[in-house]
Amino acid sequence: MKRYIFGNWKMSLSIKESRELAESLTSVLSGSPSEKLGIGVAPSPLALPAVSEILRTTGVHVGSQNIHWSPSGAFTGEVALETIKEVGGDFTLVGHSERRTLFGETISSAVERAKYALSENFMTIFCIGETLQEREAGQTNSVLDAQLVPLLEELSSTSKTKAPLIIAYEPVWAIGTGKVATATEIEAAHKHIIDLGQRAGVVAPVLYGGSVSPDNFEEINGIPGVSGALVGGASLKAEKFGRLVEIAGG
Ligand code: PGA
């Protein structure tokens, strides 16, 4: 089974710092990406051209943290797929919980973004996950259904079941908090997501995200249904990211 490690650099680094991290990754990751291991980073949009230039020959994917659902137009503050491609980007995150909780991304707007990117065969990491309140109320599965099923149904009804979709299960309460879901919680959520995919005829790898670090990833990587990780904080240090890649590669 192919495994994946993707880093989300969020708004954490300047262009200079992004270049430095990308330079360090070229040595840390040399020879890492392969048929069996997909690696990618999502820098801030203004650092994307420099980072993709530095990583051009490494096989590491470089992508955007968000994407709009139209090819172009009057959408102030948004980024178009073609523009991401122009600067060397080859994937995008969609629906990250920070977009949903801090910037008003709704279930339907996240689905629109992913639908458009996937209709263009653009690799899309679609992020879903429940808040602590929802987990404690026993609503985890219904939240995952509400976030994911509309996208799966769309792919199914448009015969796009082979579109390059990756799903990231990221419990909101585990992101940037140092709290990691238990192995049992992760396994149950991933199984639920994989089952939803199967029902729609969509096969997509499911990554775990939320305080993943070299200290906990060996265990997480071994959980059935986990195909890798989407990593925030630990992706900002080349050695830590390199170690995660090593673990994923077995
Ligand atoms: P974290 O972030 O690894 O810092 O918790 C994960 C994410 O936001 O994707």
Image (cartoon, rainbow, N blue to C red):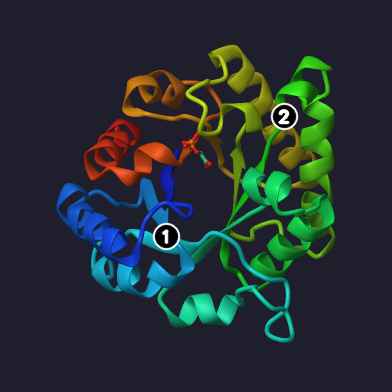
Vertical comparison of 64 with 100: above or below? below
Give the residue pinned by disc 1.
43
Mark yes or no: residue 153 visible.
Answer: no
Q: Is residue 190 left or right of residue 247?
A: right
Vertical comparison of 177 with 12: above or below? above
Query: Which one is in front, 22 or 200?
Result: 22
Label 2 CB less than 8 angstroms from ligand 1: no
Query: Which one is in front, 196 or 179?
Result: 179
Circle 2: element type: loop
**In which quadrant of the rendered view does residue 199 lie?**
top right
Give the residue pinned by disc 2.
131
Label 1 CB less than 8 angstroms from ligand 1: no
Q: Is residue 32 left or right of residue 42?
A: left
Q: Residues within 10 Å of mark 2 (few under 14, many from 20)?
A: some
Amino acid on which the number 1 mark rests in the picture? Pro
Quarter that holds the N terminus:
top left
Amino acid on which the number 2 mark rests in the picture? Thr
> Percent x, y for residue 80?
61, 77
> Percent x, y for residue 243?
26, 34
Mark yes or no: residue 56 visible.
Answer: yes
Residue ID at (59%, 22%): 186
Sequence-wise, which precedes: disc 1 or disc 2?
Answer: 1
Quarter that holds the C terminus:
top left
> Percent x, y for residue 29?
22, 49
> Percent x, y for residue 103?
71, 54
